[in-house]
Image (cartoon, helix red, strand yellow):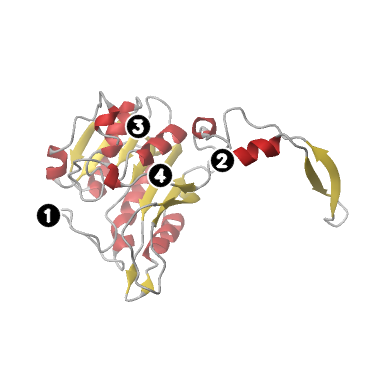
Amino acid sequence: MELNKTHIGDCMELSKDIPDNYVDLVVTSPPYADTLSYGNDVDTYGTDEFSDWILPLFKESSRFLKSTGSFILNINDKIIKGERSIYVYDLVVRVVRETGLKLYDRYIWGKKSGLPTGGDKRLNDRIEYIFHFVKDIKNFKNYTDRIRIPYADSSIVRYKNKVNTNKVTDDGGIIRWDGQKTIEANPLGTIPPGLFDFRTNAAIRGAKHPAPFHPDLPEFFIRWLTDKGDVVLDPFMGGGTTSKVALNMNRDYIGFEINETYVEELLDPIMDNKNDFWE
């Protein structure tokens, strides 16, 4: 499988050509169920058939993903006839039960902007899901210190003071007072929460693809879960966001895209000036 190239074709078939234990990170966002069109020759799938359609990709991923690798899936559900669809949850359950991948965690992408949804009886739907699958829960590659963020002012104040501590004793699990102690703050910052505020595709100027994710999303997970020289796969490459970020961070990438139009219109994936792509 040639690296640093977007291969044209169906990812369900192309993924079969990836060698075993070859990919370090998959980060992708597939067409959602009942989604807008991605081209006349590109099939989209309803909620009842979505899991059957995409599950073969996860089965192949459990083969070609390294034991230290991760699979990051950005996806969203929808309302059908006034009821929240469960197709996303169905997919997650089937991935865990029918493939070699394990659900390590789930994250929420909270969007600060977006059109009002749902009418008068439903809260505005401004979140998407990010599911984190791995092959080996204990040994997947991750570098938390790279993604630490500054402490809140209130946390800095709290670290300067002693805090109450308790311990559970062996005599029936009773919690007993264990005095006070000072906790040292990590000089690199605190661990970020699993609620992300990545910018949306509205911040990307001139995007040809109807639903690209912003570079902030793949950049975060590539930084956290890979090393330089690792292989990053996006089986739904679209406008090429993942390829640009991967190469900019000195990783190799593999891209699959079924719509030739998007591939033809990809910008040069090696960006000399990030401001040309990031707003």
Instruction: Write down the residue under mark 3.
Output: 231
**Crowd around label 2: few <14 · some 14–19 · many ≥20 (10 Å):** few
Distance between mark 3 and mark 1 Cα atoms: 29 Å
Residue 23 coordinates in the image, percent (x, y):
36, 36
Residue 64: which quarter of the image?
Answer: top left
The image shows residue 101, relative to residue 252, as above or below, that is: below
Residue at image mark 4: 71
Residue 49 % position (x, y): 29, 65
The quarter of the rendered structure image containing the C terminus is: top left
State yes or no: discs 4 and 2 in contact (Cβ < 8 Å). Answer: no
Report the residue at 42% width, 58% height from top. Answer: 92
In the image, 270 versus 259, the foreground residue is 270
Q: Secondary structure at mark 4?
A: strand
Number of other residues with Cα within 10 Å of mark 3, as a class: few under 14, some 14 to 19, many 20 or more: many
The answer to whether mark 3 and mark 4 are in CB contact below 8 A is no
Give the Cα distance between marks 4 and 2: 15 Å
Of residues 96 and 270, which is closer to you in this image?
270
Give the mark, 4 or 1, whose residue is nearer the N terminus. Answer: 1
